[in-house]
Image: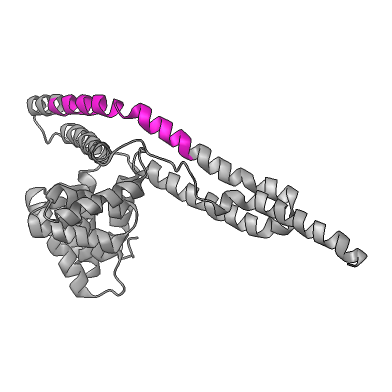
Amino acid sequence: MSTLAIFVIPFVVILGIVLASLTLPFWRRDPSPVSFGLDDDRAQELLDLQIERETVVRSLQDLEMELSQGRMDPTDYERLKATDERRLLNLLDRLDTFKDVVHDETSEQHSAASKRINWIPTIASGLVVLLASVGIYGALQFKAAQKLMAIEAEMGGGPNPMEMVAQLEKRLKENPDDLQGQIMAGRSYQALNRIPEARKAWEKVLELDPKQHEAHYNLGVIQIETRQIDDPEIFKQALTHFDIVLADLPNQPAVNWYRGLALWYLNRRQETDAAWTLAAQNMEPGSKDMEFVKDALIKLRAGEVPF
């Protein structure tokens, strides 16, 4: 055996051992994957409670607006407010029972993500040749973790929203006629920007309840915001959805804004003015949304493009 081989072979063996040791965490399966600490029923209960909490909060805000604008009797206001406040307190008490579990599991997720990322400088310092591949791996992991945390924050924290959606999909596969499940699916898909699935869920909601306001509103918005061309038929269909909602809830500002938008694209300027005026009248005074609508009205009346 040559002298060169005597030195090369041990070097190759040692290098192989170092490579195997440093990359082992990336090749083996995690023996303790992160668990959210909730079974399917508890996880679904938490998601339902979070959605119901947001609904009650919006209801209280609507009551305040109705009272401040003189469109509600003070006696009715106090009665409805007391009812919503009792519901909210009950929901907060029930959500408190999940606090420790959610806090512990969030800490575990952050800890697990940190451990994965912290391997990058270790490998880079031990073996320069792995720097590029490990750097790419770490960047992808960090980007995925950031995206997940952003979605969790948007949906109010708690269990992984992707897990919740997966459980909801399983629930709807077993019972596709679950109206509340389809409504939650529509909300969840829109929060995750999965628009085709959101559209399908809202269409199923209307199949089960043809007068469901939230489904009509969201389908109208989806038709306008995802259009590929300014086809008048698209805006007419959206207008139909908005008109169904406004037949029962004529003062809803968001619906009136989008209705005016559809009318503007249909070149029905006078009706656009009326819809946006009604929207502005029912918005919180001094809010950014109100200022935006007022600015659009000024431009509309001046013959300019309003947005």
Viewport quadrant of the N terminus: bottom right
In depth, the one of 153 and 112 nearer the eye is 112
Using the image, determine if residue 89 lies above or below residue 1. Answer: above
The image shows residue 21 at horizontal and vertical percentages of: 66, 49
Q: Residue at x 18, y 49 (%)?
A: 181
Q: Quadrant of residue 116?
A: top right
Note whether residue 37 is visible.
yes
- Residue lying farthest front? 1
In depth, the one of 124 and 92 nearer the eye is 124
Using the image, determine if residue 274 lies above or below residue 281. Answer: below
268 sits to left or right of 33 = left
216 sits to left or right of 21 = left
Q: Residue at x 24, y 47 (%)?
A: 280
273 sits to left or right of 146 = left
The image shows residue 175 at horizontal and vertical percentages of: 14, 53
Using the image, determine if residue 86 lies above or below residue 239. Answer: above
The image shows residue 207 at horizontal and vertical percentages of: 9, 60
Q: Which region of the structure is painted magenta?
A: 83-109
